[in-house]
Every structure is written in C-alpha cells, then in structure tokens.
Image (spheres, helix red, strand yellow):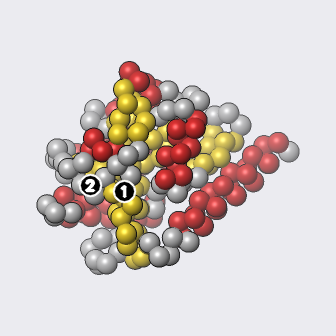
C-alpha cells in the first residue's frame, strides 16, 4: 500500500511538472526552425544565477559556463535506466562532435540526500571526464528544480520519478530549448547547428 502511494505521488508530481511546462504557453512554442526539433522557449529564461556544488564542495554557477552551449539533465546516480541511457547518449554526442570546447554537459541530482557533490560529479564524469555533476542541500536542489520546471518524487529510498528532459542553454546561460526522450535522436544535429551559430 505504501509503495502504491509513492507511485501515485510520483506520477502526480511528474504530471504537475508537465502541466507547469505546458502552461508556459506565452513562453513556449514549437521551434521556429524546422531544423531544431526541441521545444523552444519564446523568451529565453535566464538561469545564470543558479548555483550548486560539485567535487570538493566547490560552488559552481551556471554563469561560469557563459560563452558555451550547455546541456542540462536532471537525474540521480542510483537510477537504473533513463539516467545512464541519457548520459550515455550525451557522451556519444559529445564524442561525435569531436568534444568541442564550447559545449558543456551538466547533470543535476534530484537525490541530494544520497548524491553528495562528490558522488554526483564522479557519476557524471564517468560518462565523460568533461561532464560535471552538481548537487547541494535539499532546499538548494528544490529551488533549482523549480527554476527549470522539473518535478521529482521518491519511490522508497532508492528510486525516483523525475522529469527526464534535456535543456539547452545558450551562450548567455539562458534556457532556450528542451528535448524530451522522443526528441533525443535529433539532439546531435541540432547541437551542431547551434554551435555553428556564433551569436546564439
């Protein structure tokens, strides 16, 4: 019964997160370019002030990545499926684009009680040494999730339902696109296009 309740809570949380994204109708629209297959924010959302911690409790601000195209994924290190699959896809993308200096991949943990900054970073960098894992206190992570319209709910102590999209930040550390799992097949080509646009 308790497990069922957790599942229901998780589903409700994700539906709420999806609804929040959907109701951004004045800010979200289909991508203006037929080549870009993600969902575009009509008005990019500045997240440059978002700060969390990485290896050694080093504070990292998304402003640190200004000048780069940044991919942000929310996950957790004990995830059995979507997180390792997504990060493997991002690692493959990164390699196939010849590991460009102007591209950064970040994973933000939705399980900060287990995923310390050291654990989160070790996990993310295990897929590629340049990937950065971020975490923080429960409060800090919750605030960041709210900024990104991400939902997560625990199932017991080792499993989470969570929003599994990949966000693309432009070179000003503004949220510009989001990609659901069904759009991931287009991500490599789209990122290559965005990297070629110097003023994007």
Q: Is residue 59 visible?
A: yes
Does residue 35 sit above or below 14 in this rendering?
below
Towards the viewer: 67 or 97: 67
Residue 172 circle label: 2
Q: Most extreme residue toward the right, as rendered? A: 1
Disc 2 versus disc 1: distance between alpha carbons? 8 Å
Q: Position of residue 6 (x, y in %)?
A: 75, 46
* Helix, strand or loop at mark 1: strand
Q: Are marks 2 and 1 in contact (CB under 8 Å)?
A: yes
In this rendered view, identify the residue nearer to me: 71 or 41. 41
In the picture, the quarter occupied by the N terminus is: top right
- Out of 176 and 9, give the one closest to the viewer: 176
Where residue 17 sits in the image (x, y, percent)?
Answer: 59, 59
Indicate the position of residue 149 as horizontal and vertical percent values.
52, 57
Relative placement, left or right, of 186 versus 107 is left
Q: Which residue is mark 1?
A: 46
Residue 148 tag number: none
Q: Is residue 62 above or below residue 138?
A: below
């Amino acid at each position: 019964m308790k497990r069922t309740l957790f599942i229901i809570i998780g589903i409700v949380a994700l539906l709420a997160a999806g609804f929040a994204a959907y109701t951004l109708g004045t800010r979200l629209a289909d991508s203006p370019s037929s080549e870009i297959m993600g969902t575009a924010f009509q008005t990019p959302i500045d997240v440059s002030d978002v700060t969390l911690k990485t290896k050694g409790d080093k504070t990292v601000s998304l402003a640190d990545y200004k000048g780069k195209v940044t991919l942000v994924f929310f996950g957790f290190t004990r995830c059995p499926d979507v997180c390792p699959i997504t990060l493997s896809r991002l690692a493959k993308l990164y390699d196939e684009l010849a590991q460009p200096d102007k591209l950064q991949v970040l994973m933000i943990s939705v399980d900060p009680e287990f995923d310390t900054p050291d654990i989160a970073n070790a996990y993310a960098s295990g897929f590629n040494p340049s990937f950065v894992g971020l975490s923080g206190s429960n409060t800090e992570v919750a605030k960041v999730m709210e900024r990104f319209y991400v939902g997560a709910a625990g199932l017991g102590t080792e499993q989470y339902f969570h929003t599994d999209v990949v966000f693309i930040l432009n070179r000003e550390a503004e949220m510009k696109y989001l990609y659901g799992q069904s759009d991931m097949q287009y991500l490599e080509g789209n990122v290559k296009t965005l990297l070629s646009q110097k003023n994007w």
